[in-house]
């Protein structure tokens, strides 16, 4: 597998996102966390969440991959929550999290919040995760169209986040993927101003994974993204 990642501050004062891709022979894991910008210490929350997630999955344990992933995300939630309890300056902090534990023919993914995982297969882009957000609930209920949700004044309001309470629900996905498929993980700063067609275009036109990450970030910023922008790419193969 080949990996690439890019995270930029964009038009915010600081970068509250955190990303993970493996180096060398590390565990085949990718993750993106987006610290809650409207709360204290979002950058601390996202960093803790990713650090604990990686550490827990490296340790392994009983049960299958889905159980391991769920337990690791729960540990990350607890770590963020407990840190905020003893650091008053961090009270109320939280973070989204989207991740995938990778195997040759399948992957196990999880998400909390509105950071996303897309699966690119045979020229088609499919959103694997479901956003935990106010507008996503309105779309699911039929009160808004996806186009209306993209411009809704409360589109940044999330309904789940790691670390804001002692326990949080996490969505788990077990999916198959094939050789040459690509997974794209990102914060909302990337997709908020881009269509699926935009994402596919950047993936198809780029000649390396690093170039694809750079192209996606630049496209988001040029299209008017006001947030931090983070993207992780992983291809199930040895060449881009």
Image (cartoon, grey):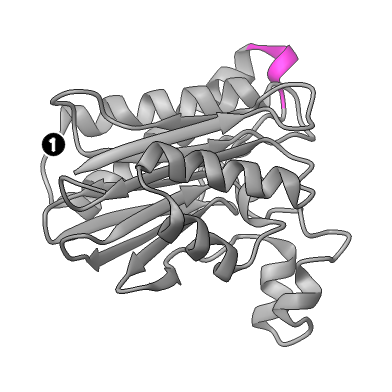
Residue visible at 60% across and 60% down?
132
| 238 left or right, relative to 188 | left
Q: Which residues are magenta?
A: 87-91
Report x, y in % for residue 82.
53, 23
- Above or below: residue 51 compared with residue 124: above
| 111 left or right, relative to 197 | left
Using the image as rendered, state which of residue 224 and residue 43 is in the foreground.
224
Residue visible at 74% across and 82% down?
145
Residue visible at 36% across and 47% down?
207
| Secondary element at image label 1 | loop
Using the image as rendered, state which of residue 76 and residue 216 is in the foreground.
216
Report x, y in % for residue 231.
50, 42
Report x, y in % for residue 148.
81, 76
- Above or below: residue 171 compared with residue 49: below
Q: Is residue 115 in view from this perspective? A: yes
- Above or below: residue 230 compared with residue 67: above
**The residue positioned farthest toward the bottom in the image shown:** 142
Using the image as rendered, state which of residue 123 and residue 7 is in the foreground.
123
């Amino acid at each position: 597998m080949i990996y690439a990642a890019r995270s930029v501050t964009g038009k915010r004062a600081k970068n509250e996102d955190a990303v993970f891709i493996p180096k060398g022979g590390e565990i085949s894991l990718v993750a993106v966390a987006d610290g809650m910008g409207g709360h204290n210490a979002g950058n601390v929350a996202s960093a803790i969440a990713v650090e604990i997630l990686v550490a827990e999955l490296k340790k392994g344990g009983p049960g299958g991959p889905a159980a391991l992933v769920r337990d690791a995300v729960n540990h990350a939630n607890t770590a963020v929550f407990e840190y905020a309890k003893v650091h008053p300056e961090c009270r109320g902090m939280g973070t989204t999290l989207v991740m995938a534990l990778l195997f040759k023919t399948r992957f196990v993914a999880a998400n909390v919040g509105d950071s996303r995982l897309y699966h690119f297969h045979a020229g088609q882009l499919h959103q694997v995760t479901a956003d935990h957000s106010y507008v996503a609930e309105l779309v699911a209920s039929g009160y808004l169209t996806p186009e209306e949700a993209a411009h809704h004044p409360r589109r940044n309001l999330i309904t789940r986040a790691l670390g804001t309470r002692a326990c949080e629900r996490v969505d788990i996905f077990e999916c198959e993927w094939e050789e040459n498929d690509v997974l794209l993980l990102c914060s909302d700063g990337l997709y908020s101003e881009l269509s699926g067609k935009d994402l596919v275009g950047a993936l198809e036109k780029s000649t390396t994974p690093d170039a694809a990450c750079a192209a996606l970030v630049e496209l988001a910023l040029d299209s008017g993204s006001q947030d931090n922008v983070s993207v992780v790419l992983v291809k199930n193969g040895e060449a881009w």
